[in-house]
Image (cartoon, rainbow, N blue to C red):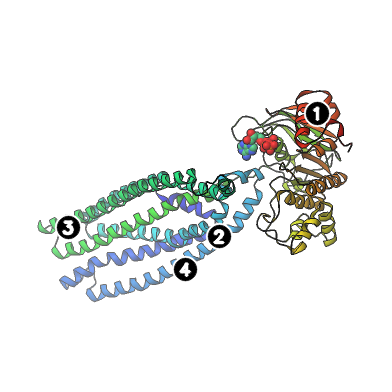
Amino acid sequence: MSTLPLADIVPRSKKMLSRPAELDTVIGVSALAGLVEGLALAALLPTITALAESDAVWGLRLSGWLWVLGGLSVVSFVINYVSARRSYDVALDFLRSIHRIFGDQVAKQPLGWFARPVAGALSRLVSTELMMAGEILAHMISPLVSRATAALVIIVAAWVWSPLLGLVLTCAIPVFVLITLVSAAFVRRGRTIHEPAEVDLANRIVEYAQSQGALRSCGRSGDFEPLTDAMARARAKKKSALLIETLGLLLSGMVTQGVIVVLISVAGSLAVAGTLEPIPALAFIGLALRFTSTLSAITDAAMSLESRRPLLDQLDEVLDATPLPAPDSPADLSAPGAVALTNVTFGYGTGEPVLRDVSIDVPAGSMVALVGPSGSGKTTVAKLVSRFYDVDAGRVLVGGVPVTEQTTEQLMAQLSIVFQDVYLFDDTLLANIAVGREGASEDEVLNAARTAGVAEIAHRLPGGWDSNVGEGGRALSGGERQRVAIARALLKKAPIVLLDEATSALDVENEANIVAAIDELRTQATVLVIAHRLDTIARADSIVALTDAGEVEAIGTHDELVAAGGTYASYWTRLSRAQGWQLTNRPTG
Ligand SMILES: Nc1ncnc2c1ncn2[C@@H]1O[C@H](COP(=O)(O)OP(=O)(O)OP(=O)(O)O)[C@@H](O)[C@H]1O
């Protein structure tokens, strides 16, 4: 039952442990602790009676019951200690193994998975929230189990002592179950009210920070309406949520007090009516008070678990993500270095297709340029070749074999990917290139770097090759970052290079370096380039023009496509004007 937390939280927690059976042990030991605690509480009944009547109760006098109580306290202390130790062991196992389990799981995901919101939340999940999930195992499950067991033992003892009192206590159980369910519903309701507003506020804050340049240039950095609106919304929603959560707490407190009053009244009435002796009635009231505080503690523990549920949902989403199906062993490549898309149709999620019946042939050793208006699906073609996603119809072949029939390692070994948004590690310039091929010698790294024009960058930076490029490579310009990525690709020597040229205007130095680097890449690999510069388009062996509907409009050489007229010819003319070229001064490659 999803509304009673333990039922689904235990199996979900087990998925995140390297030794899941340990959690069963914790639950067993906690139940034992609850049993002893319940017995100690139940022993109050005969102890108080023996104290008042100085007779033997159930064969033991007061001193005997005091020994029993003392013995149970010692046993309870030992078992609680064992239970706490075991809980910490399980929590530590969780914290140790979850990073590995997460790492393995994330490494298996297709690159497209990283565009999902949960992937964006990964760093927060791994750094701070996993600690909170560890708390569930260290502090929440064990008390819940032990208190539930203790409550059960008290009920059984009350039935044995007096079926009438047993019945009275039993009647309190459904009331507490109801309180737990209602309080959980209040907590959930409160959460659904304020959580979306808080997520939106967090996004607006990031947006505000990232758009400082644009905002300052418009003189609006002090007043960013989307952020102030989001703050006001989050405040209002938090207020409503607090109101609802407080209502839930008040209600549960009131009902608990009501139950206590009813239990005391029942015991008092039975004593007044002579059905119950005054001393057992007093003993019962003491037991009833402990019983209700135990049930209250169960409600609190259940609420704490309930508040962790969204965190577990996010962890589950990562752990349940299924990698794209792939074979266990690499396939035999029938056309190494070749890339082909045959009748490919693809859309993101359930949206409209972005590519429709697209067929492209990139023979080994050739350079094919993809051109088309913004949004026509050029980057999507490169993503399908890298198998970020699987196509809806048609096939994508790399090395002559469908990407679906290759292992991820085999596919990635054939590809070097240079996208526009190049990410550099917070490391030195040289290390950022060396990452292209493990075990490459320094000479090889420097050669690749020089060919891609990274030497000029090294000269400019104060620390030369050993300069730190900052997180994401923020010490370098976009064009420079792309040169580093091209150097990585040159070093990797993969047979196929997917290159998404920077759209931003490049300075003369960047431009010359990228032209030279692409020429070098062509000598060692097949190049499929999303081309934005005339130079690159004109140098290609073949050009594929996409329409804004994601269809192939024409395939051919530059001369063929210009001669055919159509959108390519007008695109070329527009681009030539923008980049200051004439049709006649096209380089010959
Ligand atoms: N992860 C995604 N989820 C949903 N839609 C997407 C995603 N990535 C791209 N799209 C959509 O797919 C279409 C094609 O995008 P794509 O980036 O492939 O175009 P493009 O031709 O490379 O554009 P540009 O030249 O501007 O980079 C666009 O309408 C875009 O909004």
Determine which residue is flagged by label 4: 85
Disc 3 from disc 1: Cα separation: 92 Å
Looking at the rendered structure, the number of numbered marks drawn on it comes to 4
Which quarter of the figure has residue 327? Answer: top right
Determine which residue is flagged by label 3: 267
Disc 3 from disc 2: Cα separation: 48 Å
Circle 4: element type: helix
Q: Residue at x 31, y 57 (%)?
A: 296
Residue type at mark 1 is Ile
Residue type at mark 2 is Arg
Which is nearer the N-term, disc 2 or disc 4?
2
Image quadrant containing the C terminus: top right
Q: Is residue 298 above or below residue 542?
A: below
Residue type at mark 4 is Arg
Which is nearer the N-term, disc 3 or disc 2?
2
Relative image position of residue 471 (x, y in whole percent):
65, 57
Tell me whether the residue at label 1 lies in contact with that at label 4, contact meaning CB atoms closer than 8 angstroms.
Answer: no
Disc 2 from disc 4: Cα separation: 15 Å
Which is nearer the N-term, disc 3 or disc 1?
3
Of marks 1 and 4, the one in the foreground: 1
- Badge 3 residue CB within 8 Å of ligand 1: no
